[in-house]
Image (cartoon, helix red, strand yellow):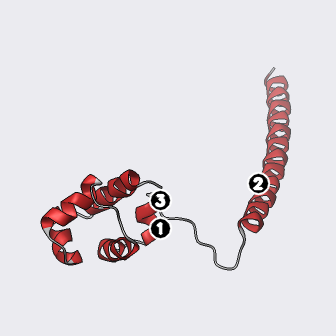
Amino acid sequence: MDNISIKDNIRKFRKSRGLTQEEMAHRVGISLTAYRDIERGKTAILNTHVEELAEHLEISPEEIVLGYRPVQMPGKALNEVQEEHRLQISTLEKRIEDLEKLVKSLEENIQSKNEIISMLKK
């Protein structure tokens, strides 16, 4: 992630919370000029600034750096989660297939009943 993306993320999150640059500068404890330089990308973001900015924006430092909230599933590796999702998808696809067969069967029953009704009306 480059400094430009980080500064864009900081600006986006600040604005989404309705905060001004002046309010953020005050909260972080730096001058307005220093804060503006951060959002302009003129100042490289140090880890301490990222953590402090995130704290005041009530988001994680990862959100500032990445631009979104990373998925957190404690105790599970990504490949475990992916495998679980594959199994769920497979189960749902089988269920859809079964339901499609049921719908087809019910449609055939309706057609048969409609034919019987039609014959009885004659």
Q: Secondary structure at mark 3?
A: helix
Q: Secondary structure at mark 1?
A: helix
- Residue at left 32%, top 60%? 10
> First in sequence: mark 1 or mark 2?
1
Residue 55 visible in the picture? yes
- Count residues near mark 3 (Cα–Cα under 10 Å), then give few for <14, some for 14-19, many for 20+: some
Q: Are marks 1 and 3 in contact (CB under 8 Å)?
A: yes
Task: Give the camera-side residue of 27 and 121.
Answer: 27
Residue 15 visible in the picture? no
Where 52 sits versus 85, above or below? below
For label 1, the residue is 62
Q: Position of residue 2 (x, y in %)?
A: 44, 54
Which amino acid does the dot numbered 2 rest on? Ile
Which residue is at the far top? 122
- Residue at left 79%, top 49%? 93
Q: CA distance from mark 1 to mark 2?
A: 29 Å
Q: CA distance from mark 1 to mark 3?
A: 6 Å
Task: Give the camera-side residue of 64 and 85.
Answer: 64
> Residue 104's quadrant in the figure?
top right
Which amino acid does the dot numbered 3 rest on? Leu
For label 2, the residue is 89
Left of 90 or right of it: where is 26? left
Q: Position of residue 32 (x, y in %)?
A: 14, 66
> Residue 82's quadrant in the figure?
bottom right
Which amino acid does the dot numbered 1 rest on? Glu
The tally of labels here is: 3
> First in sequence: mark 2 or mark 3?
3
- Residue at left 20%, top 77%? 27
Q: CA distance from mark 2 to mark 3?
A: 28 Å
For label 3, the residue is 66
> Residue 97's quadrant in the figure?
top right
